[in-house]
Image (spheres, helix red, strand yellow):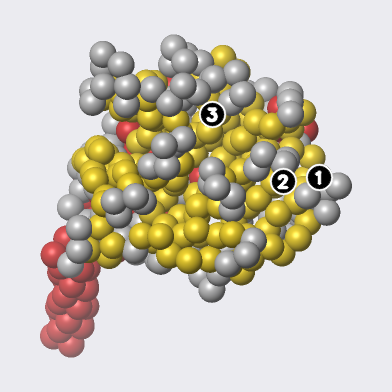
Amino acid sequence: MASTIGCVTLTLSLVLAVLFALTVQVFYFSPIDPLLLEIPPSVFSISSTKNNKLQNVIKLGEGLKQPEDVCVDKDGVLYTATRDGWIKRMVRNGKWENWKHINSSTLLGITTSKDGGLIVCDTSLGLLKVTEEDGFSVILSQVNGSQLIFADDVIEASDGNIYFSVGSTKFSLHNWHLDLLEARPNGQLLKYNPMSNETAIVLDDLFFANGVALSKDEDYLIVCETWKFRCVRNWLKGINKGKTDIFIENLPGGPDNINLAPDGSFWIALVQITSERFGFVHTSKVCKHLLASFPRLFNLINSATKSALVVNVGTDGKIIRKFDDNEGKVISFVTSAVEFEDHLYLGSLHSDFVGKLPL
């Protein structure tokens, strides 16, 4: 009898010790200091308005490794940056070329440069310039004496100024899920002046600053706040110069990259941050700490790879068109949408091709 009681006591002691150790690990050593995340109802109602038009995409360059962003130059050449360090391009005849190689697995946003070549965001190296003649060179690797760790998307204005987003000043690309779980405004929008070699903060305290786009007349700049399900607008010219307002909010997904369309509207790729089934995770600090301590658990609830969604938004901030692949049957985790010659070209962090959708 005494032996049985002793075994029970030992077992309970071990269980309590494990629970105490787990509690200390989850809360005391947690890598995040979380806020609760407010998810708009539009995120959970999107399945009721599905059209699955993205299931009609033509697959270009099958075998590409996570082509996150795409752009098209003035000659109609399509470019994308892939996770194996290549800048690949598709010329007019449909042939793909391995154009330039960068020894990096952290390439994100790309844009064409006014004087030729591309400007590329590398979350490890910083802002890069890639040209036919010189390969790649680093434009900017530090901001105010600190390493530039998460350059996300970039656009160049006609005056040569380069605007770019920093997704998070706290977490790296490989720990982006921690920034989501923390849900604090760790992002920035910056401007780099290549003439003076100066970098200035345009907007601070952004909730994961992501896609960046200039308006057709370059009188304002839009930056996506992924964790806030909105895009904000910073005025560069006119009576509102220097002011910032909300361009669109309550989007049915977290806005990733944004690109100007030929008619002056914008294409925004939306990421499904969560689902109705797991939405409770973002309203519980305990759940957030638990997921931050055990990344494999986060992978189980990650909804980004399960669907695809892009919207076309007018200059009035209202959605004009919406295309989706609600179950991700053909394409999923779309991160970029660029319109060129009546087609939409789609980048993705989950599909191994660039999607082409006739408009």
Residue highlighted by disc 3 = 260
Could you tell me how far apart the alpha carbons at marks 1 and 2 are, in whole angstroms? 6 Å
Residue carrying label 1? 92
Q: CA distance from mark 3 to mark 1?
A: 21 Å
Quadrant for residue 162, please give it: top left
Q: Residue furthest front?
A: 195
* Quadrant of the rendering where the C terminus is positioned: top right
Q: Quadrant of residue 184?
A: top left
Q: Residues within 10 Å of mark 1 (few under 14, many from 20)?
A: few
Rate crowding at label 2 as few (under 14), some (14 to 19) or many (20 or more) other CA atoms within 10 Å: some
Screen quadrant of the N terminus: bottom left
State which mark lies toward you, 2 or 3: 2
x, y percent for residue 87: 62, 60
Which residue is painted at 47% across and 15% down in the image?
315
- Which amino acid is tagged 1? Arg
Instruction: Residue 85: give x, y in percent of width and height.
Output: 58, 67
Residue to which mark 2 is pinned: 77
**Helix, strand or loop at mark 2:** loop
Q: Position of residue 274 (x, y in %)?
A: 43, 39
**Residue at horizontal 50%, vertical 52%?**
119
- Give the residue at x 29% y 51%: 196
